[in-house]
C-alpha cells in the first residue's frame, strides 16, 4: 500500500513559514537540494492546498528560464510531469499536470491508495497536512530542520489534542547543519474479533 508522507523544511521551533510570511531561511543549499530532488523521485502523486499550489506554479514553466542551472532544470523535469491534486474551494482551474478538488481528502487518499501505482502520496502545505493528520492519514513525517528560530508563523505540526506515536526510521545531518528526521507513525494493530 502506498504511504502518505508529509515532507517540508521547518524551523527548529516548528514553523514552515515565519510570522512575517517568509521562509527564505529554508532555502536549501546544494547538498540539501540534491536530497530534495532524490526525495521527489519517490513521489507518485502530490496533494496540496491552494497556497502551496500557487507558490509552486512557477515550476510549471521554469524550464523556459535560460538562467536555470542543471539542478533546477532537473527539479523542474521531475516536478512538471508529477501528477498533482489541488484542494481548493476558491480556485476554478489549475494548470499543468494537476486536477482540482474542493473536498474529500480522505476519499481521495483512499482512492489513490487503491489504485495501482508506484511512489508515495505526498502532502504539501501545513493546512492540508493538518487535515490529513487529524484524520489519521499520514504515515510518515519527513522534516528538514533548519537551525533557526523564527518565533511563530505557520506550524509544521498540526495543533491537535491527540497523541501520535512515532518511530524514527532515518536521520542525517547535512554539512549546512540542517537535520533530516524521518518518522513513521506507529499504529496499533486492530484487535482480533
Image: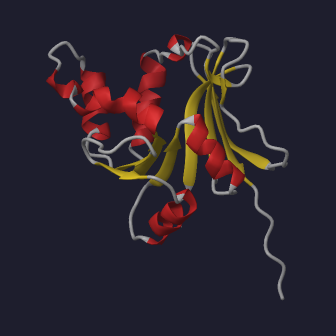
Residue 17 position (above or below residue 158): above
Closer to us: 161 or 167: 161
Point 79% across, 75% down: residue: 190
Residue 88, located in which quarter of the rendered image? Answer: top left
**Is residue 41 left or right of 105 when viewed as pictured?**
left
Please tell me which residue is depicted at 30% across the width and 43% down the height of the picture.
94
Residue 143 in picture, x, y percent from top left: 62, 33
Picture coordinates of residue 14, whole percent (x, y): 71, 25
Left/right of residue 21 with respect to residue 67 in the rendered view: right
Residue 34 lies in what quarter of the image? Answer: top left
Against 88, residue 73 (above or below) is above
Comparing 110 with 181, the one in front is: 110
Question: Residue 102 placed where, x, y %?
Answer: 45, 52
Q: How many marks?
A: 0
Answer left or right for 138 relative to 125. Answer: right
Residue drawn 57% across the image and 43% down it: 128
Residue nearest the viewer, comparing 29 with 175: 29
Image quadrant occupied by the C terminus: bottom right
Q: Position of residue 146 (x, y in %)?
A: 63, 18
Residue at left offset 45%, top offset 33%: 52
Amino acid at each position: 500500500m502506498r504511504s502518505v508522507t508529509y515532507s517540508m523544511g521547518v524551523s527548529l521551533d516548528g514553523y514552515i513559514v515565519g510570522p512575517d510570511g517568509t521562509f527564505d531561511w529554508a532555502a536549501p543549499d546544494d547538498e540539501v537540494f540534491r536530497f530534495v530532488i532524490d526525495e521527489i523521485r519517490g513521489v507518485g502523486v502530490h496533494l496540496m492546498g491552494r497556497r502551496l499550489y500557487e507558490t509552486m506554479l512557477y515550476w510549471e514553466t521554469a524550464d523556459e528560464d535560460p538562467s536555470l542551472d542543471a539542478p533546477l532544470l532537473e527539479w523542474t523535469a521531475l516536478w512538471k510531469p508529477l501528477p498533482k491534486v489541488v484542494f481548493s474551494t476558491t480556485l476554478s482551474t489549475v494548470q499543468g499536470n494537476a486536477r482540482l478538488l474542493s473536498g474529500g481528502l480522505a476519499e481521495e487518499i483512499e482512492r489513490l491508495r487503491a489504485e495501482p501505482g508506484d511512489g508515495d502520496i505526498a502532502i504539501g502545505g501545513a493546512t492540508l497536512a493538518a487535515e490529513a493528520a487529524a484524520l489519521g492519514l499520514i504515515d510518515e513525517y519527513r522534516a528538514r530542520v533548519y537551525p533557526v528560530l523564527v518565533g511563530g508563523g505557520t506550524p509544521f505540526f498540526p495543533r491537535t489534542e491527540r497523541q501520535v506515536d512515532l518511530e524514527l526510521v532515518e536521520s542525517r545531518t547535512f554539512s549546512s547543519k540542517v537535520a533530516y528526521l524521518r518518522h513513521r507513525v506507529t499504529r496499533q494493530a486492530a484487535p482480533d474479533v
